[in-house]
Image (cartoon, rainbow, N blue to C red):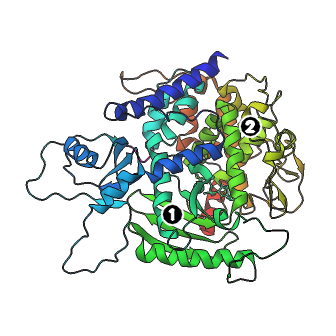
Amino acid sequence: CLKKVDTLLRRNIGTNAVVAQGEALCKEESDVKDGSQSLYAVQAKRQEQAERSVLISCLSKTNEKKFVKYLSKYGDIQKYFFYESYGMYAVIEYTNQESVSSLLEDTAFPSFSHECMVPFKSRLLSLRNIGSADSAHRQLCQPQTTVPINTLIERLSREESIDQQVTALTEAYQLTEENIRLRFLVCSLLKDIAAAYFPECSIKPFGSSVNGYGKLGCDLDMILDLDGISGRKAKMPKAGLFMEYQMKSENSERDVTKSILSVIGECVDRFGPGCVGVQKILNARCPLVRFSHQPSGFQCDLTANNRVAIKSTELLYLYGELDPRVRSLVFTVRCWARTHAITSSIPGAWITNFSLTFMVLFFLQKRSPPIIPTLDHLRALAGPEDKSLIEGNDCTFVSDFSKIRPLSNTETLEKLLCEFFEFYSTFSFSQKSINVRKGKEQNKPEVAPLHIQNPFETSLNVSKNVNAVQLERFIALCQESSWLLQQSETRTPGVSTDGNTATPWGLATLLMPSQIAAVRSGKKRRREPASERIKGLLESLKKDN
Ligand code: CTP
Ligand code: MG
């Protein structure tokens, strides 16, 4: 219980520290932590905040006081912050949306003698200054990227327990309040483009931007939601006259999605300020438009009609909110996997973060007593308002967190981390499938090196892309990490050698690249130079690439 309080306290101290800087300058106090609200409620609040916000490219020597004073002419500012991404930017959130409208009314058109502008007005603006340049400037820049791995290793080495290391890693890697606001703002800016065709649409983030496991720098997955248009059915009379819209039709829902994304993608490419490198990937299982949003630095994936993905995002969010150990363990395993190139930002035969998250959740369901309930249990707790059937898939589960009884497991993060590696070192991947719905391994329904059942589209394997080589690497690294965590020298806090740097120990040791080679998959565990087998695996990997 004390550990839990400690974790929560540490988490809150971290978040408060970030927000406190902004508080000194603006009135915003809330939103430090959304509490155990449903993802739906959190999203609605954040979307509304984003609608009242503008994104401004600033001059390098922006005088903060003057800048804020100028913008305050248009209304009260609720919150603002500066960040850097190929230049200085500011997010300004007004208290009322009318302030945004009056600012835009006063905003000038750019005038370049050698270029012609596409006259698309958006809430992405540039600060200009006529006359003398500002001298004084003071900006609180919010980080947009995580700390480099060596800095993290050093930071973790100074902690006094593995539990503290796991918590420190989570704090260093999780999305900041500001980064989340920026993500919602980018969605809102894109919605303004899509609204040219579909005025009642909304664009919502999903995936790791909102499921609680997002790391600074993760991509921004978005969904164009047209349910507000097509889902809102006008009441049909039992008899008599009524009106119906005339609409074009396509052969399938997929074709509708493809044509909508194609047009929106074209618009983003031609008219969207700051959107570059637009690619339409319409023949993928889930059609999408991919691009970079330069002012935020986000790599964006825009999809449509992807409601099951929203449900899986809600489910992951719920699990993360049930117990702070869930998020911490997911962050740690994700970071460990990225460090050892088990995961990659390039699509391929690698295990994805999404799959890894299910592996952690499944492991937590298998503890005795379990740390999180099965999806079947969450389904049993659902009320009529939670019923959800999407394209024939049962996506029903409870949304009211208070209906879920806390479980009595009190294991420490250290214990869980060791056990996670041990669990997957010996898991029968060749025979069994990971099943979060049942919380029990099932016989594999198909031949695939790694089988993780998609909890909602149960005929799908979340890790279909993973090949045998990548799975073997994962197992070998789990074995090595499990072995390392059993060594007394790994478990003993590092002694500061020069008063500044501490010798890597505990979790920090697991993140050190030099350690990965010392494993021989399924054989005797030794700490020695790279085995022939690992070299072979690396060679075959190079060939694959
Ligand atoms: N998704 C899915 N099935 C997959 C892959 C992805 O349903 N096989 C959905 C999930 O809802 C996932 C989202 O698409 O959260 C975004 O996918 P991705 O960006 O790959 O994963 P994230 O969870 O966002 O993690 P990351 O931080 O790596 O972006
Ligand atoms: Mg993502």
Q: How many marks?
A: 2
Q: Which residues are drawn in magenta?
A: 142-147
- In magenta segment, residue 352: no
Left or right: 129 in relation to 518: left
* Vertical placement of residue 362 versus 225, above or below: above
* Vertical placement of residue 520 versus 393, above or below: above
Task: Give the labeled residue for mark 2.
Answer: 400
Residue 309 sits in which quadrant? bottom right
The quadrant of the picture showing ligand 1 is bottom right
For label 1, the SS is helix
Q: Position of residue 447 (x, y in %)?
A: 85, 63
Left or right: 431 in relation to 92: right
Q: Nearer the viewer, residue 201 or 207?
A: 201
Q: Residue at x 73, y 47 (%)?
A: 358
Task: Give the labeled residue for mark 1.
Answer: 191
Q: Residue at x 55, y 25 (%)?
A: 164
Q: Position of residue 379 (x, y in %)?
A: 84, 44
Circle 2: is it few (<14), some (14-19), or many (20+) Cα within 10 Å?
some
| Dominant secondary structure (helix, strand or loop) of the stretch shown in magenta | loop
Left or right: 37 in relation to 75: right
Q: Nearer the viewer, residue 195 or 391?
A: 195
* Vertical placement of residue 304 versus 502, above or below: below
Residue 54 sits in which quadrant? bottom left
| Residue 140 appears in the picture as rendered | yes
Circle 1: is it few (<14), some (14-19), or many (20+) Cα within 10 Å?
many
Q: Position of residue 136 (x, y in %)?
A: 14, 42
Residue type (three-letter) at the residue carrying disc 1? Lys
The quarter of the image holding the C terminus is bottom right
For label 2, the SS is loop
